[in-house]
Amino acid sequence: MMQAVDIDRRRLGVNFTGEGLATVRLWAPKLEEVHIRFNNQTMPLLPEAHGYWTLTTPNLQPGDDYEFITPNGKAIPDPASLCQPYGVHGASRALDLAAFAWTDHKWVNPSQDDYIFYEIHVGTFSPQGNFQGVIEKLPHLKALGITAIELMPVAQFPGTRNWGYDGVFPYAVHTTYGGARGLQELVNRCHTLGIAVVLDVVYNHLGPEGNYFKEFGPYFTSKYKTPWGEAINFDDAHCDDVRRFFIENVLMWFRDFHIDALRLDAVHAIKDFSPVHILKAIRQEVDAFIQNHWCMHYLFVELDLNDPRYIDLVKRGGYGMDAQWADEFHHALRVTTGQERSGYYADFQGVGHLAKAYRDAYVYDGQYSEHRLKCFGIPATQQAGNKFIVFSQNHDQVGNRMHGERTSALVSFRLLKVMAGATILSPYLPLLFMGEEYGEKNPFQYFVHHGDPQLIRHVRRGRREEFAAFHTRGEAPDPQSESTFINSKLQWDRLQEDEHQALFHYYQALIELRKKHPAFHHLDRFALEVFCEKEANVLVLHRWHHSDHAWCAMNFSKSAQPVALVEDQPLLNVLDSGDAHWKGDEPSPSILHAGSFILPPESLVVYTGKYD
């Protein structure tokens, strides 16, 4: 049985006691002996049970570089390293995470219902491409109404540019972003401004370059494969201490970096048939941490399975994750706007499926999927609205296109506003992808900076093969080229242009309406009706909270369409994408006296009223 995890302190890697001593702890059951080298001296580690090696010394200090020496004389960085100043192949550096002077003692993590996510890739978000660049843009996000930023993975990866999913040091914050201290400063500043921080972490695989885990122990299993390589060993021989490694990583982000929530990448690729699934084990340890520290932390997951077991409560037999990304909402919304139906989009049929996503969260909850060639999903009837995170675009849905086109390059300015309203006014948690709030035109393309020529060739070939089902013409941008990375940076000067500024103000108004109107603020997905006209490509979302009612009418077609609402009392127009304030030219009636009206093409309008 796995030994209990110490939720109050990090035990793996190098840690400092506060009494001038460093403790070193390494799990390396494959090694018959191991030494640590630092400051031109080499010292042996002492063996402990279950393959652990330890050392306590006053000679290793914060800021010192160190590496482990195997019996054959090979120098290897620490798998639990907090800092890799020389890259993924170089020595590790000892850090004292407790040395940071936090000033967020009064911070309270918002209710999950109040999360409005803004996804950020640190390297392309600002001109600087680091945490300081994010800090400088926080006033913009605060003005927008964002309550939580979500950082794409920051664990140390090869080179200086990467999406982050090739990380090979789960505990080390990438040096080019600003390292551990830079991330702590960013979180501290966010909390000062009332913004939560979500961190994307990868527990389903590790990157190929700089991956030295096999040198130490059976971190991987041959029982399973993932789309990205070997599966992490969560249920095979020696899995107890692999599970400990990742559970301690979860707790480190909450305890030592004050991260408010984690987004666990592609948990459907985590293979675990243990009696206690690793996600459930993480949930249990996080709950203990929450209870011990009187603070709230959330666990969100990316999940390509319509299986509510992942988000169901532990006491009901679930894994206890707080919410999941709902890709099917995105797919249905995208097809509704007339975009191509290739690849997995072929399963979606436009506005009818979008209406089902509003009603049922899962579009596929038992039906036959032509793309998957099987019946797929089960209903999520017991799951609240705050269990689902929806978006009109994200890093995957943009970056996994051949040319990385954002939605602003695929649909009209009018439809951009309709899609924004469809997402933000949904009964779910909305996520924005960086730059969408002002209609960024630069693409977000897939980029890497590997040092292994064979791996570079493999990545290039893989990108070509990936698009076989989506595209028939053209070539994907070279992932290794620096220009692909540079072309993906945000153009902040766009905000000075009238149309982009108008879109930003429209997003502000949508977020403000979501926060203030009871029908939108309360995420009761059962206090909801959806009406759609498939031929007209029109959808009406009716939501209410007690006597407060709101109707969001969306016309996705290029023609004006008749829309019928209630008839027994006037309704007030509280937000209209056709308003001149956001570069619209066909507003709907400001007060709706009759039960029907003509909704202009590619437009969205919200009417509100009170009913006893």
Image (spheres, rainbow, N blue to C red):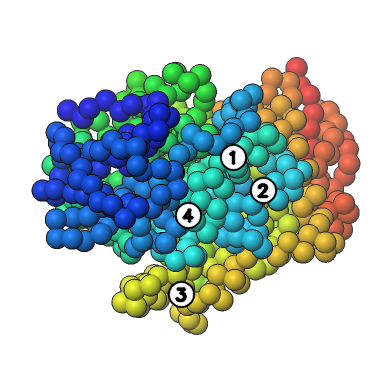
Q: Which residue corresponds to mark 4? A: 174
CB-based contact (under 8 Å), mark 1 and mark 4: no
Q: In this view, does 220 lie to the left or right of 142?
A: left
- Cα separation, mark 2 vs mark 3, equals 28 Å
Q: Which residue corresponds to mark 3? A: 480
Classify 10 Å Cα crowding around label 3: few (below 14), some (14-19), many (20 and above).
many
Rendered image quadrant of residue 277: top left
Tag 4 or tag 1, which sits nearer the N-term? 4
Q: Locate the C terminus and report the quarter of the image it occupies.
A: top right
State which mark lies toward you, 2 or 3.
2
- Give amino acid for label 4: His
Tag 1 or tag 2, which sits nearer the N-term? 2
Instruction: State the SS at label 2.
Output: helix
Classify 10 Å Cα crowding around label 2: few (below 14), some (14-19), many (20 and above).
some
Asked if 542 appears above or below 222 in the picture, the reply is above
Residue 493's x, y, as percent? 77, 64
Residue 109's x, y, as percent? 59, 28
Tag 3 or tag 2, which sits nearer the N-term? 2
Tag 4 or tag 2, which sits nearer the N-term? 2
- Cα separation, mark 4 vs mark 3, equals 18 Å
- Give amino acid for label 1: Val
Q: Residue 135 carries which label?
A: 2
CB-based contact (under 8 Å), mark 1 and mark 3: no
Q: In this view, does 322 lie to the left or right of 307?
A: right
- Cα separation, mark 1 vs mark 3, equals 31 Å
- Cα separation, mark 2 vs mark 1, equals 9 Å
- Give amino acid for label 3: Gln
Q: Locate the N terminus and report the quarter of the image it occupies.
A: top left
Q: Which residue corresponds to mark 1? A: 187
CB-based contact (under 8 Å), mark 2 and mark 1: no
